Amino acid sequence: MSSGAMIWLEAAFLGLVQGLTEFLPVSSSAHLRIIGPLLPSGGDPGAAFTAITQIGTELAVLIYFRREIGRMTRAWFASVAGRGQRGDPDARMAWLVIIGTVPIAVLGLLFKDAIEGSLRNLYITATVLILFALVLAAADRLGRKQHDLGRLTWVHGVMFGLAQATALIPGVSRSGGTITAGLIMGYTREAAARYSFLLAVPAVLAAGFYQLFKTWGEPGPIGAGPTALATLVAFAVGYWVIVVFLKLVSTRSYLPFVYYRIVLGVVVLGLLQIGVLSPH
């Protein structure tokens, strides 16, 4: 197989990984960071590739939640124009998503260089995978799981947002961070997961399009064509994962993901020690 064909095949595989892991509490950015160097081309696909392929998974969110997002958008514009009903739950949810997006936007800009550089160290990624697995396990076991999203408060919206911002570190997981925060605050697994998906839309799309325009025309580890293919694959797989995951979390615990994170973290630490993986 030619090197050109191999790059396209690797990009499609990375898109598959992105789609499978974006909405699960296992960290898609960690998986891309770990798997990239193990592929024949042997390199970190980079923060830009990760952010751009996430556009595909967020398009899956937009389509799956299109009615809910449509209602929220219309209600928000009506509230801004002073034409909405006082206390409209859709407008309130839209405002909560906006407020919850502020922490990751601010911290993402402040620590941009570290996010694209030093925080991609695989020792950090592996350690975070393990430590955050323990936090998720505790939250899933001890959380009261009583509240639906109708009980979401402004303070909780900010707390969800701060939890989402921890995903700037590969290994935490965007969905894992927000879901864990939701469980700690007493929300049901399904409510925490649904809000996690909605909260991610503006942040992920903004980061993805920022990286797309920033790197447009510049050479990178993976070219524009293969990156577009990976984004398309991530969209298709991500939509399927949303459907399955929301059904799963309503009846099952997060323990399988906890065990998976711990095993993955230990394996990565082992591969680093024997030299199969490089930390940078």
Image (cartoon, helix red, strand yellow):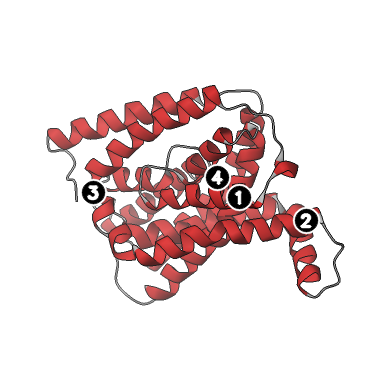
Q: Residues within 10 Å of mark 2 (few under 14, many from 20)?
A: some
| Camera-side residue of 96 and 56 | 96
Expressed as whole percent of the image width and height from the top left, the position of residue 228 reads 46, 62
Q: Viewer-nearest of labels 1 and 3? A: 1
User: Which residue is rendered at x = 22% and y = 41% of the image?
Assistant: 123
Q: Would you say residue 126 is visible in this rendering?
A: yes
User: Which residue is rendered at x = 42% and y = 49% of the image?
Assistant: 166
Q: Would you say residue 4 is visible in this rendering?
A: no
Residue 36, disc: none
List the residue tagged with mark 3.
Answer: 121
Q: Viewer-nearest of labels 3 and 4? A: 3
Q: State yes or no: discs 2 and 4 in contact (Cβ < 8 Å).
A: no
Q: Earlier in the sequence, mark 2 or mark 3?
A: 2
Q: Amino acid at mark 4?
A: Val
List the residue tagged with mark 4.
Answer: 237
The answer for how far apart the CA atoms under marks 2 and 1 are is 18 Å
List the residue tagged with mark 1.
Answer: 155
Q: Earlier in the sequence, mark 2 or mark 4?
A: 2
Relative to 181, is 151 on the left or the right? right
Q: Earlier in the sequence, mark 1 or mark 3?
A: 3
Q: State yes or no: discs 2 and 1 in contact (Cβ < 8 Å).
A: no
Q: State yes or no: discs 1 and 4 in contact (Cβ < 8 Å).
A: no
Expressed as whole percent of the image width and height from the top left, the position of residue 175 reads 52, 43
The answer for how far apart the CA atoms under marks 2 and 3 are is 40 Å
Q: Secondary structure at mark 2?
A: helix
Q: Earlier in the sequence, mark 1 or mark 4?
A: 1
Q: Residue furthest front?
A: 155
Q: Residues within 10 Å of mark 3 (few under 14, many from 20)?
A: some
